[in-house]
């Protein structure tokens, strides 16, 4: 994995890079129960420096609540297009 280094802005102060964002949509195939990730892996991705965004209800058919993802550090945007 490549590391992003802080950069200087026009005013000369150091600006920390934004973390790479991983967006995880909910499955669209009927009755599909697989999910792109589980809360435990969200925690690990965040520790690696990623921002994780999950579509609302993405883990619902796999019995994974939105609250479990939020507690793991993910954010759940108000609309699906926001994850992209």
Image (cartoon, rainbow, N blue to C red):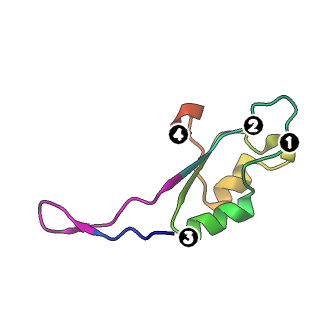
**Is 51 part of what is drawn in magenta?**
no
Q: In this rendering, is residue 22 above or below 25?
A: below
Residue found 73% across the figure and 39% down from its top: 57
Q: In this rendering, is residue 59 above or below 19?
A: above
Distance of label 4 from label 3 (alpha carbons): 20 Å
How many discs appear? 4
Viewer-side residue, 70 vs 7: 7
Distance of label 3 from label 2 (alpha carbons): 25 Å
Distance of label 2 from label 1 (alpha carbons): 8 Å
The numbered mark, 3 or 1, whose residue comes first in the sequence reads 1
Q: Which residue is mark 1?
A: 33
Position in image of residue 78 (x %, y %)? 56, 35
Local packing at callout 3 (Cα closer than 10 Å; few below 14, some 14-19, many 20+) is few
Distance of label 3 from label 1 (alpha carbons): 27 Å
Distance of label 4 from label 1 (alpha carbons): 21 Å
Q: Secondary structure at mark 1?
A: loop
Determine the residue located farthest toward the front in the rendered image: 1
Q: Secondary structure at mark 3?
A: loop
Residue found 45% across the figure and 60% down from its top: 19
Do the residues under discs 2 and 1 have CB atoms within 8 angstroms?
yes
Viewer-side residue, 2 vs 66: 2
Q: Which residue is mark 3?
A: 48
Q: Secondary structure at mark 2?
A: loop
* Magenta extent: 7-21
Position in image of residue 32 (x %, y %)? 85, 37
Q: Which residue is mark 4?
A: 84
């Amino acid at each position: 994995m490549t590391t992003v280094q802080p950069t200087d802005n026009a005013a000369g102060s150091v600006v920390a890079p934004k973390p790479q964002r991983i967006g995880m949509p909910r499955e669209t195939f009927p009755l599909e129960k697989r999910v792109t990730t589980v809360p435990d892996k969200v925690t690990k991705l965040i520790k690696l420096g990623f921002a994780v965004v999950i579509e609302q209800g993405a883990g619902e058919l796999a019995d994974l609540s939105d609250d479990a993802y939020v507690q793991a550090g993910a954010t759940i945007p108000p609309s699906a297009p926001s994850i992209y």
